[in-house]
Amino acid sequence: MKELVLNNLYSREDVHGIFSPETNFTPQAGTWGLHGIIKIPQREGDFVFFVTYGQSQGEHQFDEGITPDGVLSWQSQPRQTFESEVIQTLINHDETINNIYLFLREEMKGDYQYLGKLKYLNHDKEREQPVYFQWQLLDSKSLDDSNELSFKNQDKAEELGEIKLTDAKPDSKKAGVSKENFRATKSPDYALKESKNRKLGLLGEELVLKHEIANLRSEGRDDLAEKVVHISKVEGDGAGYDIRSFDKSGSIKYIEVKATRGGINTDFYMSPRELLFSKKNKSEYFLYRVFNLSKKNNGEFYILNGDVEEEFNKTPTGFRLSKK
């Protein structure tokens, strides 16, 4: 049995031997010999994708490709609809629980290159037969690039850009996007890309700090503007929030900032301490979600007040275990 190694080449029989060695393999026939979407036996929700660029089926020509940021455009089989069981499973795919393994080749003959596991990004809610998906390659090296935003001399407020408040709020992750947006947008999984980017997080905090101070001064509350504190910079990350500010009446605001280069629907990460703080202090707790940050450090943001878990689905991405 071959081992699964990123970027190595594998035949369909090799892949069958890795994931389903107890069954028979028939070349050019059966599930493992022909199909593009294969359920892995005894592993509900796990799949193997075999993709061939330029493949056709009947009169349908598949249009698939991968961006430099590891976003895969992929189509289901032409007969499949939103009601198909496998399509519903793929739309609801959770990469923290299940795996989809991608094997790709550029010609009809020859072996497939293993490109790693996939994460659901979105789908086109307006087109079916086939259904159009975008997936994130989780093992794409380009995701390690965490220094795209300029971050020089950020202690000088005049070098910061501007963020504008918007009334828009994020949509449900699995709702899909319009055909127009699907075709126009192939954004990578910015949450994954930015999860350990402390510089980006600090930039978002500095922009919100600047906004809060300017807003209080515009309300004639210079006295309160002088009392706004960048807690995460003064104390570190242990407080459960980033900025202590005020509304114009003087009531306290505990602000947690989450920043991204991605759009309004980009996922984000929070620590157990941050989630607990939002629950215990929900009346005074405010999430400022900064998004669409440009390289000139301009962007937008929305605000949510209260317990974060009442507004967002929470997905555990790891557990620490100790002996009972």
Image (cartoon, helix red, strand yellow):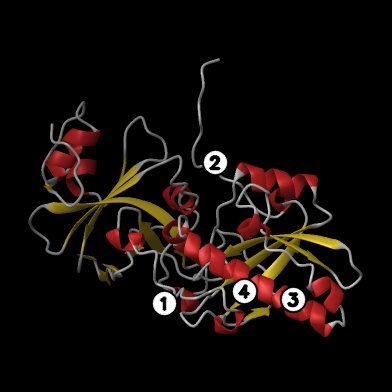
> Marks 1/4: CA distance?
32 Å
Amino acid on which the number 4 mark rests in the picture = Leu
Mark 3: few, some, or many residues within 10 Å (few <14, many ≥20)?
many
Q: Which residue is mark 2?
A: 316
Q: Nearer the viewer, mark 2 or mark 3?
A: 3
Q: Position of residue 281 (x, y in %)?
A: 80, 49
Q: Position of residue 164 (x, y in %)?
A: 66, 81
Amino acid on which the number 3 mark rests in the picture = Ile
Mark 4: few, some, or many residues within 10 Å (few <14, many ≥20)?
many
Image vertical order of residue 187 relative to residue 173, above or below: below
Q: Quadrant of residue 1?
A: top left
> Marks 3/1: CA distance?
40 Å
In what element is the residue under mark 1?
A: helix
Image vertical order of residue 309 relative to residue 148, above or below: above
Asked if the residue under mark 1 is in contact with the one under mark 3, i.e. CB atoms within 8 Å, the reply is no
Q: Which residue is mark 3?
A: 213
Q: Which mark is residue 183?
A: 1
